[in-house]
Image (cartoon, rainbow, N blue to C red):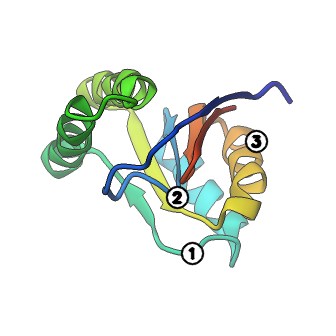
Amino acid sequence: MNNETETIEQTPVGHLYGKVIGIFKLQTQLEAFITQLGTTVVGDVESLSGLNGTKQLESWKESFSQYFFGEMEIKMLQLYLDAAAVDLIVFAVEVESDLANETAEIAKANGAVNVVYFGNSVVTNY
């Protein structure tokens, strides 16, 4: 697996951290992902689609525009906003850091693209 990791020197307050986020093309892919996750995750899988999902993504992006080290987060959030605009399914799921790689692998195995883990001190792009 080819991972890119960027270390962040500080962590702004926000609900983005501790989550694996990615994009599915089909609802069936999201459903299969949720089924395969089982008890791996900390929280529910969020579908960031439609008006509410777009508002959440925009809120995260806005909070990072005020943050000096938030460049990678802003780029990825814009990618997710663009995906939501063309009716792709953006998902987010909170995971413990030691389960991020496994969760990302399950997502990719079910067809997810642009999968990223926003950790408390790193951002990992799968």
> Which residue lies at the image location 37% right of the left edge and 31% below the top edge?
70
Give the quarter of the figure containing the C terminus: top right
* Whole-number angstrom distance, CA of label 2 to CA of label 1: 10 Å
Task: Write down the quadrant of residue 41 in the picture.
Answer: bottom right
Which residue is under mark 1? 42
Which class describes the residues within 10 Å of circle 2: few (<14), some (14-19), or many (20+)? many
Give the SS element for disc 1: loop
For marks 2 and 3, the one nearer the N-term is: 2
Q: Is residue 50 left or right of residue 101?
A: left
Give the SS element for disc 3: helix
Which residue is under mark 2? 18
- Where is residue 72? Give x, y as percent: 45, 25
Give the SS element for disc 2: loop
> Which residue lies at the image location 28% right of the left edge and 45% below the top edge?
49
Choose mark 1 or mark 3, whichever is in front: 1
Which residue is under mark 3? 109
Give the quarter of the figure containing the N terminus: top right
Q: Are marks 2 and 1 in contact (CB under 8 Å)?
A: yes
Task: Write down the quadrant of residue 109 in the picture.
Answer: top right
For marks 2 and 1, the one nearer the N-term is: 2
- Where is residue 92? Give x, y as percent: 45, 53
Question: Furthest-right residue in view?
Answer: 1
Q: Is residue 107 left or right of residue 14?
A: right
Q: Relative to 37, is 111 above or below?
A: above
Q: Is residue 13 left or right of residue 109?
A: left
Q: Is residue 109 left or right of residue 62?
A: right
Q: Relative to 81, is 110 above or below?
A: below
Q: Amino acid at mark 2?
A: Gly
Q: Amino acid at mark 3?
A: Ala
- Where is residue 66? Give x, y as percent: 20, 34
For marks 1 and 3, the one nearer the N-term is: 1
